[in-house]
Amino acid sequence: MKSTVVYILILWASQSFILRSLFAQEMFSETDSFSVRIDTQDKDGVFYGAQQVQCFIEITNRSDENIKLSIDWEISTDDWQPLMKRSLSLELDGNQSTSAFCPWYAFKDPGFYRYSAKLSDGFGRSGQVSMVIGIEPEALRPLLNPPDDFMDFWDKSVQELNVINPDYGLKPIKRAGKTRTDLYEVEMQSFGNLTVRGWLEVPKKKGKYPTLLRVPGYTENLRPLDKYEDMIIFSFNTRDHGESDNTGVRSYDMWVRGMESKENYYYRGIFLDCMRAIDYLESRDDVDMERLAIWGGSQGGGLSFAIAALDQRVKLCVVDIPYMCDYPRYFAITHWNEIDHWFAEDASHTWELMYNTLSYFDTKYLAKRIKCPVMMGIGLQDDVCPPSTSFMTFNLIEGDKSFDIYKNEKHAQPDAHYENRFLSIRKFFGID
């Protein structure tokens, strides 16, 4: 299956968390002696009911000599709890290929699970491959223990935003050549009196248009698209992104900034930035607020979940490979260097303190407040935002929702996903 990073580079997550977690998967491995690929005999790697998982490896002997391989199979949960281990052996003639299937295993619970196979030829040459599969993912449910003042905190935060004069600014931007839209740089005052900015693309013909608000992946600088002549697109960069003001040095440790308290935590300002962007869109006569969609990937996916819950002006929520979903499970699967650095800064920095702050920004506690339709895209092999965390939020949404899951993708989406999402948004808007 062809994989691409074009979707990430063009749309949102060109740098939304670098791929450096412990939740690493490799679906192909190669040595001088042999190569091996892992797969399942189904389309999307997700299984339901009595459907059995047929996981196998394809092995190619790359030498002229016959080889004898040992195969160590292991099945574990996606948070690294071992379920089964089996060792097998296999002989393979020179320049030949074969398939070897993992022994049968009966899964007892819905969730996401990891198959891995380690091969050795007895001469110190080894290769390891693994992949994640899903078992009835829509049946997953998280533990829910929201803070007692969860919505009070967000209601007060919105009130604090509302007393800040947005002081909207609009600057036309000249572009070379023929374009579908007129381009403007927009700026506004947001929470903490920071100036945040974005690119507004408006059809040349006067009218009232459906509008898409794009929100950024982590560290991403969203740029104009000039894609449609019948839709307004606002490519908005929150604080510390694009041309917007900074809260400090831009780096990959921004997400732990201010984590000592919910009031000062980094994502409080970013959530409110997005709502300020919607304030701006509502101030325009050419925006049809009954056809307003929000779309983001990775960090932007989490923001789309959160803003659709906190701001009922959003009429369609489009989410890809989302972050900020079920933090306790997220950090049971992944681990980031920034956590170690934050713990080392101060003895008072503990898991308890971290989870207490993050609980106010966990989208699973916002899911039931989402009333608009939701579309979600998932990479089954995502080692940055593991799919089980995404479903912990998605499954609690009570309204109209759908998802696409891509068997071989990590923290990305395949080529066609980007265009298909735009077509789905246009269909929802009632255009084309």
Image (cartoon, rainbow, N blue to C red):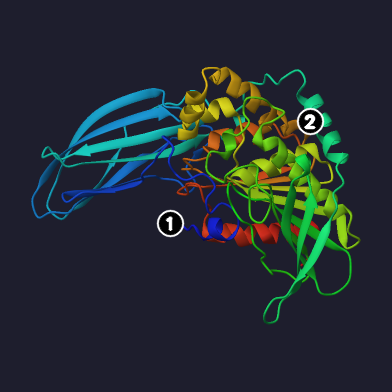
* Badge 1 vs badge 2, beta-carbon distance below 8 Å: no
Q: Is residue 4 shown left or right of residue 31?
A: right
> Would you place residue 219 above or below residue 184 in this image?
above
The outermost residue toward the bottom is 177
Q: Secondary structure at mark 1?
A: loop
> Looking at the figure, which quarter contains the N terminus?
bottom left
Q: Amino acid at mark 1?
A: Met
- Residue at horizontal 77%, vertical 41%? 191
The image position of residue 284, as x and y in percent, is 88, 59
Q: How many marks?
A: 2
The answer to which of marks 1 and 2 sits earlier in the sequence is 1
- Residue at horizontal 68%, vertical 47%? 239
Circle 1 residue:
1
> Looking at the figure, which quarter contains the C terminus?
bottom right
Compute the Cα span from label 1 to label 2. 43 Å
The outermost residue toward the left is 65
Front in this rendered view, residue 68 or 183: 183
Front in this rendered view, residue 343 or 5: 343
The image position of residue 386, as x and y in percent, is 51, 37
- Residue at horizontal 64%, vertical 62%? 223
Q: Is residue 115 visible?
A: yes
Q: Which mark is residue 77?
A: none
Label 2 Cα crowd, 10 Å radius (few <14 / some 14-19 / many 20+): some
Label 1 Cα crowd, 10 Å radius (few <14 / some 14-19 / many 20+): few
Q: Is residue 121 shown left or right of residue 315?
A: left
> Would you place residue 25 above or below residue 12 in this image?
above
Report which quarter residue 394 is drawn in.
Answer: top right
Q: Which mark is residue 154?
A: 2
Q: Is residue 315 visible?
A: no
The image position of residue 22, as x and y in percent, is 41, 34
Q: Amino acid at mark 2?
A: Trp
